[in-house]
Image (tube, rainbow, N blue to C red):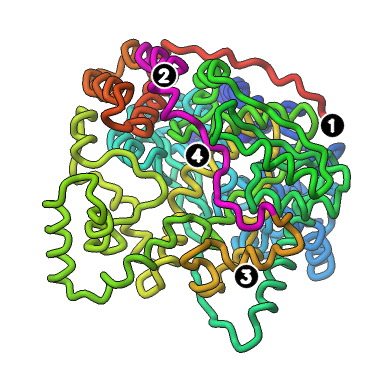
Amino acid sequence: MCGLLGFLTSDGTTDDTVSRVDQAMHCMRHRGPDEHGTWNDGQVVFGFNRLSIIDIAHSHQPLRWGPPDNPERYALTFNGEIYNYVELRAQLADEFGAQFRTEGDSEAIVAAFHYWGEDAVRRLRGMFAFAIWDTEQGELFVARDPFGIKPLFLATGGHGTAFASEKKSLLEIADVVGIDTELDNRALEHYTVLQYVPEPETLHRRIRRLESGSFARVRPGSDPVVTRYFRPSFPVRPFTAGSEQARYQEIAEVLEDSVAKHMRADVTVGSFLSGGIDSTAIAALAMRHNPKLITFTTGFQREGYSEVDVAAESAEAIGARHVVKVVSPEEFAAAIPEIVWYLDDPVADPALVPLWFVAREARKHVKVVLSGEGADELFGGYTIYREPLSLAPFEKLPAPLRRAAGALSERIPDGTRGKSLLHRGSMPLEERYYGNARSFNDAQLRAVLRDFRPEWTHQDVTAPIYAQSRGWDPVARMQHLDLFTWLRGDILVKADKTTMANSLELRVPFLDPEVFAVASRIPLDQKITKSTTKYALRKALEGIVPAHVLHRAKLGFPVPIRHWLAGPELFDWARENITASQTDHLVDKAAVLRMLDEHRAGTSDHSRRLWTVLTFMIWHGIFVEGRIVPDIKEPVYPVDL
């Protein structure tokens, strides 16, 4: 695990180039406080900060490896973990006689690439973003894991191509790479609607992200050539008579195998525990490998916005030691600038704030935590996935009647029972569903954004994804869309950024290729019913998850933003940030202040919209204006826990 930064030059490296890359690594020192260094060969510079987890004593980076006739052929810098590295090393040694000088997972990646070529990425079970420089071929190969658990940013300019785990380090060497730092107004509009910046965009026009499940080849002086290697599908195979229990057993076994492999580490592994079925299942399975497991949760001192009690009950039921962090409104507000700095691009999900606090608490006890991200997308866990059941009658209507229903819904007064159902039933799935984040509609967006363009819609992002799922059932299409939008744009970004900000590695056993292979074959009626979600997963976890959790409604780490923005906790803080922001050329601040006043008066709930704008304003204050300077402290964590 590390933070990596590299630069493939068009015209050769200089001492100044190496020095600048080395200096730029400092702004992501939190990703790897255990080791730091750079390497170059005249064409490429690699920088790394290492958080040592596996083979602590030997797997240093950048790592050199090659076959016996050229043992230094490749240089690797790697962020992540490969959980099947033991099996891969054994296979490579048996089939090809591969030789290794360490006991870690890094050499398995390079050896796999040497013997299997680009197909190696399909054989890796883990989370990863890595770069391999082939000194013999003069080519750079960069790749990212199937689901986008680990980030990788790319920037190509007049002097070459740079890549990094965090965008802020690329901004530090923008002049070296030869790129400008102009903002991307289209990405800003997408962010305002979705509450995150969708891949491959960032808010800087010349910096993009290598998409999840993709790799790229780069030669000096040329643009990266990107290839998608992971194309998830949901090939439903109906149950045969009497096979339901076999399917539940299959789910339980693949999850147990995934958790077992995710427990591989030379340091202590803990687990986040929110009180829901997903994190409880992971913690319960982890207990089988570490009976002294420590679990961690967070919450607020406000009724309805905390799962602390339920999480504590779950921890007691599975026998885990439990640690709780309660976050006050004052702590919450004070931490936001620092958290936004770590994010690189704004993510308007308030849940990332308590996640940051619980990660900070966990790092006092462990170096690695497991978590339950991905279960909802793979097994059908979001309540919105049940919407096709209620809208099924509309699917049988001829198109003219559906359009008439939509026109009728427009004439029904707001707040009237059935208006929303009629309106959404008149729309095709591609128009009505664009993920779990829904913030501004066009009218609201036009009032707030100075450069609003009606042609820049969420369909820029969703249409190409929906095109890949034609003919699937609607729930599978929604799951597929969420894999490419909400999961990798919000959930995994906040998980990675908030934990790595605290030099803590987070592992997500649900997001494993073998788990996905099983989950993707689950039929619709085993995902959602009229009364529940994740039906097959719940059945599979009977006997693993405590009974009081098995059928609980999803809550997660909820945040009382709606109440705080209207009350003394955050109202003045919000007004001060809006007033001080120098985003007048981008945002109509008067319109935002009106929204804030309406929210306090209770005439409209603008909490999500306000939080979206406020997060951007703080981001702009840090990365554009330089007006906000968060207090980023040096990591002081011990090497081993």
Is the Cβ of the residue at disc 1 closer than 8 Å to that at disc 4? no
Between the C-alphas of marks 3 and 1, the distance is 35 Å
Which residue is rendered at x = 35% and y = 65% of the image? 390
Q: Would you name the residue on which mark 2 appears?
A: 567
Q: Would you name the residue on which mark 1 appears?
A: 640
Between the C-alphas of marks 4 and 2, the distance is 39 Å
Residue 45 appears in the picture as rendered: no
User: Residue flagged by tag 3: what amino acid is it?
Assistant: Val
Mark sitting earlier along the chain (1/4):
4
Pinpoint residue 351: horizontal percent, then vertical percent. 52, 35
Between the C-alphas of marks 1 and 4, the distance is 29 Å
User: Residue flagged by tag 1: what amino acid is it?
Assistant: Asp
Q: Nearer the viewer, mark 2 or mark 3?
A: 2
Mark sitting earlier along the chain (4/2):
4
Which residue is rendered at x = 41% and y = 29% of the image? 562
Mark sitting earlier along the chain (4/3):
4
Comparing 223 with 401, the one in front is 401
Q: Would you name the residue on which mark 4 appears?
A: 153
Q: Secondary structure at mark 2?
A: loop
Mark sitting earlier along the chain (1/2):
2
Mark sitting earlier along the chain (2/3):
3
